[in-house]
Amino acid sequence: MATKRMTVSQALVEFLGHQYTVDGDHRERTIAGIFGIFGHGNVAGIGQALKQFNVEQPDLMPYYQARNEQAMVHQSVGYARMHRRRATMASAASVGPGASNMLTGAALATANRMPALLLPSDTFATRVADPVLQQLELPHDIGITVNDAFRPLSRFFDRVQRPEQLYSIALAAMRVLTDPAETGAVTIALPEDVQAEAFDVPLEFLQDREWHIRRPLPERGALARAVAAIRGAKRPLIVAGGGLLYSSAEDALRAFVEATGIPVGSSQAGGGVLNWDHPQNLGGIGATGTLAANRIAAEADVIIGIGTRYSDFTTASRTAFQNPDVQFVNINVASFDAYKHGTQLPVIADAREALEALATELADLRIDASYAAHIAAEKSAWDASVDDAFAPSGLALPGQTEIIGAVQSSSAPEDVIVQAAGSLPGDLHKLWRVRDPLGYHVEYAFSCMGYEIAGGLGAKRGALADGSDRDVIVMVGDGSYLMLNSELVTAVAEGIKLIVVLIQNHGYASIGHLSETVGSDRFGTWYREYDESARNFQGEQVLPVDLAMNARSYGLDVIEVEPGASAIDDLKAALAVAKASSKSTFIHINSDPLLYAPDGAGWWDVPVAEVSTLESTQAARAEYEELQKSQKKLLG
């Protein structure tokens, strides 16, 4: 067998450069590039390998800088979302803090069912230099390193203790990365000595290899039971999840709902499955959903969940579906999700394949005219509420809904809105009018503060790789911006254009509101100077923080929208300038966090203290106990 003398790192990098995902007629590289921050753990391993290929074969495996290890993984997830999980990036980090900085990214990728390859360096396999700098030592088990923390956060984890193990580990990692039912964070821990160790690599290992995405068909029995349930329904409703987008099923969904009239409510991940103005699209569903979707959900007798993992926000903490006889038809490529909530009607299949099969079996089905009229009335009423929410108030400090409306009206249909945490995901889920399948990018499985800029950068990379110059608009609050903003430097360094709209409200708007509902009166949620006498941060003196100056220091173009009656018009003008520019632009606007979006009648179960000396908490507990009465212990 022909072989090639290489280090473990060189072999791994060359192997990754030859992996391809195939989805029908579509073929692309599975790993589009490697992010890397180098330290003593990987500078002589992965770092040397990337340098060598950069000199000899620069197109084999592109290298990209990053400023934070967590952000490398966020970029990978943003990229993967734009490529419908058919491609992602790898992230290489050094021993100890570099590796453990990626833990949050791993959890985010796995929670969102998004592929991301993590290559954290590890301490010496030989232990000849033991303990090395940055090594964690646990006397009861010397073999444990910080990388073992990735085990519960990864869909696949292994450690290359000997060079020969690389073959089976690398192949197993690729299987998980390209498996729709299993994908998430894939972690290959690389001891720093093994990274630089040489061995004879079979050339077969380094050849092009294709990974065909599985699109399983629904089983006949499961399909027949689902068809019978849907035929017997008087008020069916589809809950659309991200799985629809990842299987490119939006056309199949549109054809199915147009033929049957069945309405659709979407999860955060499912935003974009139908354009906002489609007659069957009721918008977001659940705790942050629209009043239209939630009213229809409360009466629905058959819920057809497609590609959704049924998070507590999607089910409004099991209060959204109030029909006592409600049944669930759960269509999902993963049996783990298909069987959720005790359903007896799971359909384990690809979303597109299942929809096409349902369309054939239900070709003669059409919802009742009275139900269709009810759907249309609820949608019309909600659309009018959104129009009202978007209307400028003329206040010096506009509400967040007005700001969203200004961004909406200034964006193009193909533009991508990126968000993750705080009050913005809830408002966007209710209000954003999606006009493109990939135009709504809200990371809400992990709802990670700090995802927005890195994830937006990954989304823009993903668009550019597909030949699209669509704008990526990152909306972020000051709280999340302060968590992780350093990838703005990465955007400047590579000349990648982002539009960042920072909403400054001097605190945590979402948790501040939640704090009020549980009787804690926004304690600890304002950004204020410390009050020595009260021993808290609840005073009136805001911090002298200048986030616009911070962004300017990174090299971005910055536009500051001053408070005043014309703030919304000024924001629209700023967005026009940003869209016309070829550079990244940071737009800073102040808002009033106490102005809220229209109510969608959704609930989120956040327990309130059962006993308290605070009257506010006592009142909140009484309201909580009343709301709990509508909660179902079992949905199926």
Image (cartoon, helix red, strand yellow):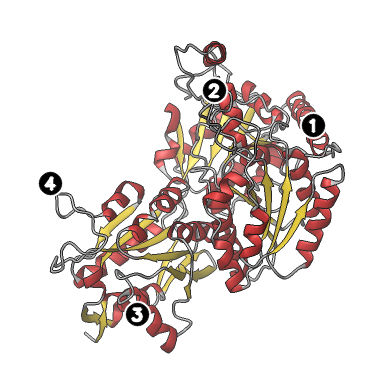
Q: Nearer the viewer, mark 2 or mark 3?
A: 2
- Circle 2 residue: 520
Helix, strand or loop at disc 2?
Answer: loop
The three-letter amino acid code for the residue at tag 3 is Gln
In the rendered image, which quarter is residue 548 located in?
bottom right
For residue 494, above or below residue 367:
below
Whether residues under marks 2 and 1 lie with C-beta atoms below 8 angstroms apart, the answer is no
Crowding at dot 2, Cα within 10 Å, few <14 / some 14-19 / many 20+, comes out as some
Tell me the quadrant of the picture where the N terminus can be found: bottom left
Circle 4/circle 3 CB separation < 8 Å = no
Residue drawn at (45%, 19%) of the image? 633
Q: Which mark is residue 385?
A: 1
Q: Amino acid at mark 1?
A: Ser
Q: In this orientation, does residue 143 appear?
A: yes
Q: Residue 140 bears which disc, if any? A: 4
Provide residue 394's location: percent of width, then percent of height.
86, 38
Pick whichever, 408 or 133, lies toward us: 133
Disc 2 marks which amino acid?
Ser
Dots 4, 2 in contact, CB < 8 A: no
Task: Measure the alpha-carbon separation of dots 2 and 3.
Answer: 53 Å
Q: Mark 4 or 3, which is nearer the eye?
A: 4
Judge left or right: residue 180 versus residue 304.
left
Q: Which residue lies under the disc numbered 3?
A: 48
**Vertical placement of residue 34 versus 539, above or below:** below
Q: What residue sits 41% from the left and 75% below the top?
A: 17
In-image side of 103 versus 366 (left or right): left
For marks 4 and 3, the one nearer the N-term is: 3
